[in-house]
Amino acid sequence: MSTLRELSTELMEVRDLALNPEIPAEALRDTLDGIEGMFNEKAVSVVHVIANNDSDISEVDAEIKRLQDRKKVMVNARARLKDYLLFNMQASDITKISSPLFNITLAAPRDIVVIDDVDSLADDYKRVTIAPDKVLIGKALKDGYKVAGAHMEKGKSSVRIK
């Protein structure tokens, strides 16, 4: 059986032959109908593969969620155990524990910056991120306005399967 690519090429070739007045219209029509029928059958088969792939993707997404949930439980358990160890080392005034496999050290706290009021900070101490508002720019361009530094172009075609 031919591939979609081969059938597409055949369709283009037959359509080019349609420009030749010596070839009977009925022969062209029959040939086109046959190729289009095979093309449609192949396209339906491709959609079946896509549908099966969608099912697999859903299963993978479910497994990813399950593993992410499991990871979250493990990360929380690790944090609780570290907090438990920290609390008890502090309560016992123990700063270092040595073993053949690893060393446990109660680290001194580091200085951290606490922001009390962002509005009171000088601009030199702030980061500003500016990003284009594509929705607003798109609306302006569609309404006929010129927007310096932006233009509208066609995106990629897509296939919709309902």
Image (tube, rainbow, N blue to C red):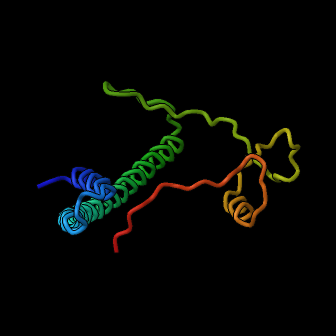
Could you tell me which residue is drawn at 68 percent across and 61 percent down?
138
Q: Residue furthest top?
A: 100
Q: 92 or 11: nearer the eye?
A: 11
Q: Residue furthest front?
A: 22
Position of the C terminus, as image quadrant, is: bottom left
Q: Residue furthest left?
A: 1
Could you tell me which residue is drawn at 17 percent across and 66 percent down?
34
Q: 86 or 65: nearer the eye?
A: 65
Give percent across and percent down for residue 108: 60, 33
Give percent across and percent down for residue 140: 75, 63
Quadrant position of residue 103:
top left
Left/right placement of residue 88 relative to residue 133 reads left
Q: Is residue 58 above or below residue 118?
A: below
Q: Is residue 38 above or below residue 83?
A: below
Could you tell me which residue is drawn at 49 percent across and 41 percent down?
89
Q: 89 or 16: nearer the eye?
A: 16
Number of dots carrying numbers: 0
Q: 72 or 154: nearer the eye?
A: 154
Give percent across and percent down for residue 33: 21, 68
Give percent across and percent down for residue 19: 34, 56
Position of the N terminus, as image quadrant, is: bottom left
Could you tell me which residue is drawn at 23 percent across and 59 percent down?
23
